Amino acid sequence: MRTRTLRMMALLAIAAGTLVYLHDPPWVGGMTSGLRDWEEDPPGTRFRWTAARGSFFVPSEATSLVLPVRSLFPGPNGAPVVVRLSVDDRFLTEIVLADPNVWVQSLIPLPRRSNARSYRRIDLHVSRTIGPYVLGVQTGEPVLERAAVVR
């Protein structure tokens, strides 16, 4: 009976430890979804294509984000392409891409974090995609600004 109780306590401790670890996993910062591999255009600008939706993670202490985006292909009848950004499922802003050849770089303030996790999820929702590869927009490397550390 005592061995059985010890086994149950050990299993509960392992389960609790696993849940704590998965609540804020250290490897999530490198995860993306809906984003293709990095490429480089002829001037040497690194970018990656999105699908209709894409996600990536930023450190939670980031206070603002500059995300270069370019549509490369206009929407139907030449309409601008719209990219909706959100953080942790909270709407941030819309970026309107009227000229398919221009990189748009908007400074996007990030709201204060609402939890103690190490990373926050940034979601992109593109208003249209192109072709059989479901290409959305091109995104450049994000530039983050972090809050100054007060001592």
Image: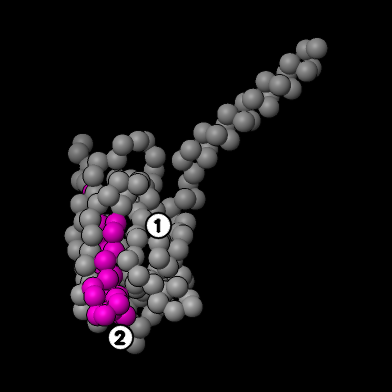
For this orientation, the residue located farthest to the front is 77
* Residue 48 visible in image: no
Q: Which circle's residue, 2 or 1, is located before the other in the chain? A: 2
* Residue 113 visible in image: yes
Tell me if 51 is positioned left or right of 79 in this view. Answer: right
Mark 2 Cα-neighbour bin, 10 Å: few <14, some 14–19, many ≥20: few
Locate residue 128, reporting x and y percent.
35, 70
Residue at 73%, 16% in the rendered image: 5
Query: Which disc, if any, is residue 133?
Result: none
Tell me if 42 is positioned left or right of 94 in this view. Answer: right
Judging by the rendered image, the residue that carries numbered circle 1 is 56
Type of residue at label 1? Phe
Residue at 38%, 80% in the rendered image: 40
Q: Quadrant of residue 55?
A: bottom left
Judging by the rendered image, the residue that carries numbered circle 2 is 43
Type of residue at label 2? Pro
For this orientation, the residue located farthest to the bottom is 42
- Disc 2 element: loop
Q: Quadrant of residue 136?
A: bottom left
Q: Quadrant of residue 98?
A: bottom left
Locate residue 7, reporting x and y percent.
74, 22
Residue in front for this viewpoint, 12 or 76: 76
CA separation, marks 2 and 1?
Answer: 25 Å
Mark 1 Cα-neighbour bin, 10 Å: few <14, some 14–19, many ≥20: some
Is the C terminus in the top left, top right, bottom left or bottom right quadrant?
A: top left
- The answer to whether residue 90 is magenta is no
Q: Can you tell which of label 2 and label 1 is closer to the viewer?
A: 1
Residue at 31%, 80% in the rendered image: 73
**Which range is magenta?**
63-85
- Disc 1 element: strand
